[in-house]
Amino acid sequence: MATNIQWTDLTINPWHLTKENGKHGGHWCRKISPGCLHCYSESTNQNPFFSFSSGIKFSGKPPDNWVLDEGILEKLLPTRPKKIFLGSMTDIFGEWVSARVLDKLFAWMALNHHHTFQILTKRADRMAAYLEDYQSGFDRAWHEIPEDIKSEWWEQESLPLVPQNIWVGASIEDQERQQERSPLLNQIHKEGWNTFYSVEPLLEKVDLQLLKYPTDWVIVGGESGLRSQARQCHLEWILDVINQCHSSKIPAFVKQLGTNPHWRNKLLRLQHIKGGNFLEFPECVQVREFPKAAVCTR
């Protein structure tokens, strides 16, 4: 699906809920940290404007009407290279997503080697545990993809141990989450995976400790939503993240300033509702850098 998310080209959600008639039944996730408070996915899922809307809150026990639509991933094969955010409406490393489903997702992403897949989680512990011992399940899922499809789209002799077209990221909205998730993402980084931080919504000044926990890319932004609800994001915090990145030679990408941006302790009034118009940014935070590997070629 086409998207307004500035750091990707496309969003896909092959793991979703289904209605009794077999149609798309919306999405579900469980809120686990401060960054989840005003979840855009939950708001979308409760909006009757969307035909798939289920009205389910992102809390309690997970629903059982999940389906994995592998056809969504197969349809990507003949398309031109793109950056693709997989699982934009849920957390695919949630405990309600089985290792078997993850195996299939990773196998299809590896087959779509001309695309760059971006996965983002608030459950870095589950992601680290899965990637530490994923190879056997990944191999099995790979062999289950029909041979005629693989023969048409796969030319390499063997599967890579770590597919370089898959980028895995962790959300970091405050210092406590940095302390919880950065060591886990660093573990994954050391194993050869491309990694990134999404420092959004940025809720306070955060020391990413990039020398201790290096990564390949950092996205940063303020919280969107209703101005009466969106929490403040001070541009000084964003500028500090940019400076940390540049000091460590890591590309930084300022996604948006948020609905409630403050600069020098004053509300910065912008025309773009999410503060996402790059031309409205103060010059010091006009930074949108991509890592080289995030731009696909075939």
Image (cartoon, grey):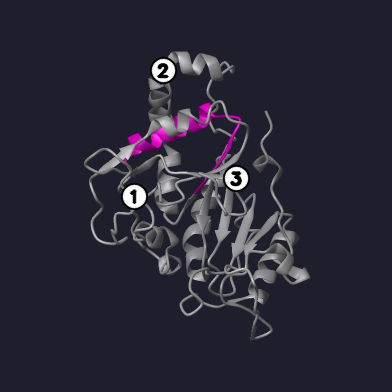
Q: Which residue is mark 3?
A: 9
Q: Which residue is mark 1?
A: 26
Helix, strand or loop for disc 1:
loop
Q: Which residue is mark 2?
A: 146
Identify the amino acid type marked 2: Pro
Helix, strand or loop for disc 3:
loop
Identify the amino acid type marked 1: Gly
> In the current view of this chain or complex, which residue is farthest to the right?
283
Lateral position of residue 57 relative to residue 235, left or right: left
Helix, strand or loop for disc 2:
loop
For residue 101: magenta? yes
Task: Identify the image quadrant of residue 50.
Answer: bottom left
| Residue 160 x %, y % | 55, 27
The region drawn magenta spans 98-119
Disc 2 or disc 3, which is closer to the eye? 3
Q: Earlier in the sequence, mark 2 or mark 3?
A: 3
Mark seen at residue 114: none
Q: Earlier in the sequence, mark 1 or mark 3?
A: 3
